[in-house]
Structure formats: structure tokens, C-alpha cells
Image (spheres, grey):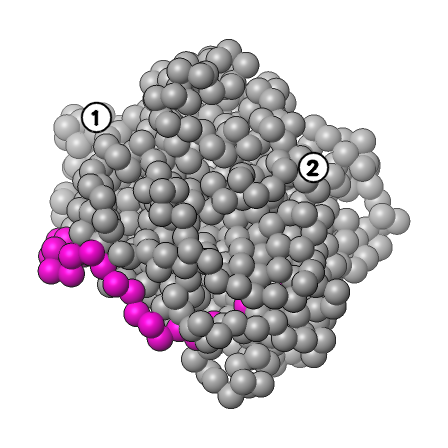
Amino acid sequence: MKVTVKLFAQLGQYLPPDAQDNQVELDVAAGATPESIFAEFRVPPENCHLVLVNGVYIAPGQRGVHALKDKDALAVWPPIAGGNSR
Amino acid sequence: MAWARNILRVNLTKGTCANEALNMDWAQKYLGQRGLATKYLVEETDPKVDPLSPDNKMIMATGPLTGTCASTAGRYSVITKGALTGAIACSNSGGFFGNEMKNAGYDMIIFEGKAKKPVYLLVENDNAQLIDASDFWGKSCWDTEEGIKAKHQDSQLRVASIGVSGEVGVKFACVVNDMHRAAGRSGVGTVMGSKNLKAVAIRGSLGVQVEDAEKFLSAVSAGKAVIADNPVTGQGLPAFGTQVLMNVINESGALPTRNHLDSQFSGAGKISAEAMAEAREGDGKSNLLTTAACFGCTIACGRISTIERSHYTVAERPEYQIASGGLEYEAAWALGAATGVEDLDALTFANFICNEQGYDPISFGATVGAAMEMYESGTISDKETGGIELKFGSAKALTELAELTGRGEGFGAEIGLGSKRLCEKYGKPELSMAVKGQEFPAYDARGIQGMGLTYATSNRGACHLRGYTVSSEIFGIPEKTDPTVSDGKAGLVKAFQDATGAVDSSGLCLFTTFAWSLDDIAPQIDAACEGDWTPERLAEVGERVWNLERMYNLQAGFTAADDTLPKRLLKDAAKTGPAEGKVSDLGKMLPEYYDARGWTAEGVPSNKTLERIAL
């Protein structure tokens, strides 16, 4: 099955050099989880602060068991936040 | 201590400047800055006053910690009745002006009346005078700041000014200090312009005293360690700034796009923090040049950017081939996603113009988005726009309107009305994405339910800085809540609003609260100020400030009917993303919120509540 992996901010360094717009499409085996994808890209799990699948938050305890489905989009950020302060 | 205990009262009608003692009883109840200045405004003006009347007052106010060595302690606010909204307005700015004002010995400067001709206020510690500003009227904020410094041969003067937009009555004009920091929202610069006050220039060297210096330094050190150790304030914001939010909010399905017709933008990646850091195809340089920090800040979220020299906006205009402030997330959203424009350099140029001519990029971009929808639906045409092809996604329309709005010319004068007045003028009031006349910032109320309630109840009109529940609903600070669910959001919004009221009254930056709770802030205030300042007391100050602002608005003529959202967010479901099929659940949350606040079903603070918070 195919999933889209999006690694943002400092995590962009773990993407292949030819990645566009901080994302790549990937063929993965059934049963793949966010954590198995982190391992595939060699992203240290402790740097995976905000993890969304199709925009829905995946809690830390679920990242090793949440089974990804075909055409899912996994998006990951290191610790970040913001807004402006005017 | 910490407070200077001193107010400068400037009567522009009479041309006088006079010192008076700060009311310390009020300082103990309202702390400073937003809270204390609102108390003065409430006591001294009629809430029904025309915002642009000489009878309205404008207050520049610092907090007790402003000018101290606490992290981010350089903030000041401009408090008045807002020109855009007709509601209480309080716009907060960083940079270095607030510190200078406090070091000149003033907690507040209260401006009243209207000068017969343009003036600026020059303050050098206890010497304050009004000076003819004829030479600067008609000039931008940038030229005014540089001109005043040159005239007085003092490059260390700190200047807050209005641009041409504030002179010509653009309803969302800012007060800009230090070239690109701004008291940005609600039209506080429009009020300043109505008083013929062009600028305030300050030099202060008196220092700021604290109650217990040893205890204060210890508390400040502990606070700075918390900021440094926190991944958001210690790493995320310094490295990527607020613009890192662009992809986060888009992926979360809450990035309002093309006047809220959609809630995800296909061009988000092209206008994001990641894009700002990428090498451009043309010159191989990145849009982002470096980062910047305000006075005393140990976070440094500010961005300094450049435009590629061959870009159409600057190719023939070397004066804009510079490094200047931006983009911050809210501005990038309004200039980009809200209009469908994905040209990063065009957004950067429009943001430069907003800073140069002193107007709010959020209200500007959102109003352009509304005008684009009216253009595409045939409500307005080239006849109204003066020939500008105002289609969603047009970078050239955006940048041309930025310049016209800054000067109040052509269709730019109509954009300068703000979306509420503009859409009403053309018979489409439902297309204004605003609350109490102020345009939304960058979070869709269908995808982040708490923000819908925050917008609807915000005392200064739609705003993310009156209760940033995004912290909890997206980032899990202090704990994660589901952004698509409305349960529990009434209490969450109230807690955020009250804590924010306290922080905004202290002299500190709200961004510290990604790392700090009131438990971290209270020891710093307690050491600096006389009186016992606990986290609980600060929360009570915040609640008191919120209710004081609410009472002002009720007396100004607002009612519970104004605590609402545009029909689009209440009736038209999000089309994509996690919130697909959802609308804002405001109808359920609002009564729960009134109850949590101790207000009546009509949204009026009950006598019991007012008694409880000593208001």
C-alpha cells in the first residue's frame, strides 16, 4: 500500500534529497505504523513531537500500534508552536 | 516598586504635558498595561464615544515588569476604543519602545483631545514636549522613525508612529515601533491619526527598580531556564518562528482558505517556514535572512527576510531590496491562504508595505479575500476595483492593493474600510469573516472548535491573542484536547482568556506561556512588586480584566447577539480534513461559556460575579 510521509521543520533533513514540499510517497507493507515509518527514515522517535495521520493526532502511546491504511498521510513535526503576539 | 508610579498626561487640544501619580490602589487590582490602562479608559471616557472623536482617549501602557531583566519584558500596549470595531481595543507590541518608555519613568502615557495640526511627542526622561510634525505628515512609519532620529541627532531614540494609512483613516491602521513591530489590531493607529498625533519618540535612562532585587534575579533566572529547556521556546520558535504553524494548521484541516470557502490550502507549503528557509531558484538565497529578538527576549521568534531582487515587486525599486521584518504566521496566512496567493516574495513585499505604511496585515489580507470573493461572484467588477483583476490567487492584485491601501487611494481606500463595512456597502454582509467588525486570524472555527468560541467572545473582536486554545487543541499545551470536539471547550477558553489577561497586564510576552504557567510568572511579579502575588491572584486579575472589558463593551452597545460567528462557519461544513462535515458548535458552547463565566443567559456579568471579583 502507499502512504504519504511528510516530515516538517528540522525533520526535513531525514527525507531523501529529491523530496518535494517536505513529503514523499512510500510503498509500505500492511501493518506499518507511524513508529515503523520513523525507523525507516531513521528519525529519532524522541524528535517526533506532533504526529498526525490524515490530520488526526496520534498520541505517543498509539504510535507503535496505529495501523496505517492505503493512501494515508503521515505528518510529523519536532517540538514547535506559535502564533503572533500583536 | 517595578511600577514607575508615574503617568504622563498629554492634552493634545491644549498642547500640554503633565505628570501625575499612578493610582496604586488600581495597580494592585489591575496590575498594569492592558488591565490598568483599561481601568483608566473606563473611568475617564464614555463607552459610547465615537472612536475618532477628540473625546476618545488613547493610552500607551507598560506593565510592572516592562524594562526589567525578566525574559521578554519589553512589551507595551495601546488601549483605546477601536476604530475598526467600536469595542474596547488593546494591541500589544514588542520591540524596544516599551522598555524605553518605562526607563523614561512612565507606566502610561494618556493622550486626550486632538491637536490643531500634526504633532509628535518627544520624551527625554522627565522632559516631555509636543513638537510640530508638519515635516513628517504624509510620510511612512519608516521615514518618520528615521527622520525623527536624524532631526534630533539621536539614533538611540525609540519611535512609535503611524504611517499614511493612519492619517487617511484606514480603519485597521497600526502603531508601528522599531520599524517592524506593531500594536497591530483593531485600528489603534487610526485613533492616533484622528488626534493628529504622528509619533512618540522616547529616550529613557532612569532604570527600573524592583521590590526585592535578589529574589527577583533568582526568579528571573529560574524562569529563563524553563524557557531555554522547553522544546517550543528553546528550539522550535527560535529556529522556525511562528511560520512553522502554516503546515501544521493546514494538515489539521483548519487553515481558512479563500475567505473561508475552504479550510485547507494547496499552496500552504510554498508560503511556510520551510519554504522561507529554502534556497530560491533564481539567486540561490533563502527568503529568511536571519532571526530577531525584542528587548530582553530569550526566545527570538522574529524573522528578518528578503525578496529576490528580480521579483516583479522590487526589480525596479531598490528601496525594497532590503532585509526587513516578517513573515510571521498570521500575516502570511492573511496575505496568502486567505487570498489564495502562494507567491512567497509577493507576500513578503505586501508585509513590508504593511509595516512601512502602518496597517494590520491580518485585517488587510482577510478584507482582500472577501473582496476577491465578491469580484469572482460578480458583485463587484473592474469598475469598482479601478481595473484590478481581483481574482483569488492573484499576487499582482494583492501587492497593488497593498500599496493603494497604504496611501488610501483608489480601491485601496475601500479595502481600508475593513471587510465588515466593505461587504455591507455592496450588499453582501455575510461575506465578511469577522466578529465585532474585526477579521479572523489564521484558524478555522470548524476545525478548531475552541477558537470559534474564543473568536465569538473576544472583547476586541475576532482574535487569537485573547485565548490561544490552539496550544491545547493542536499542541497539547498544557494538555491535549481534541480540536474537532466542543465538549469542555467553554472552561478551556475561559482559563486561557483569564491567564492571558494577566500576562498582558504584566509587561511580558504571551509567547512565554508555551513554557510558563502562572506558577512561573507569579514569583517574578511577586519579587518585583509590593503585595503578595500568587498564581491564583494573577488568574483573578485576568478574570477581572476580562469582565471590565466586557462591561465596557456592553455599555458601548454590544449585546450577546454580537457573540457570534459568520453564517459560513455555522452552516457550511468543512469540505476536507479531520473536520470534514463539521460546522462550529458555537450554539452549544456559548451558553456553557456564559455559565462558566458567571454571566446571565444574556451574557451580562451577574452581580454575584462582579462582587466575587471585586469589580
Q: Which mark is residue B133?
A: none
Q: Residue at x 72, y 75 (%)?
A: B134
Quadrant that contains the C terminus of chain B = top left
Please state which amino acid type lies under the numbered disc 1.
His
Any magenta on residue B272? no
Q: Is residue B314 above or below residue B182?
A: below
Please state which amino acid type lies under the numbered disc 2.
Lys
Q: Is residue B516 above or below residue B360?
A: above
Q: Which mark is residue A66?
A: 1
- Check disc 1 and report its element: helix, strand or loop: loop
Label 2: chain? B
Residue B250 showing in the rendered view: no
Q: Which residues are magenta?
A: B196-223
Q: Which mark is residue B420?
A: 2
Q: Residues within 10 Å of mark 1 (few under 14, many from 20)?
A: some
Q: Is residue B285 above or below residue B243?
A: below
Image coordinates of residue B83 in percent, x first then y, are 65, 46
Q: Residue at x 16, y 37 (%)?
A: A36
- From this viewpoint, which residue is outermost toward the right? B383
Mark in front: 1 vs 2? 2
Quadrant that contains the N terminus of chain B = bottom left
Label 1: chain? A
Judge from the rendering whether residue B514 lies leftward or rightward of residue B376; answer left or right: left
Any magenta on residue B207? yes
Q: Are the residues under marks 1 and 2 on the same chain?
A: no
Task: Name the one closer to the observer, A41 or B16.
Answer: B16
Image coordinates of residue A53 in percent, x first then y, are 31, 32
Image coordinates of residue B112 in percent, x first then y, are 62, 55
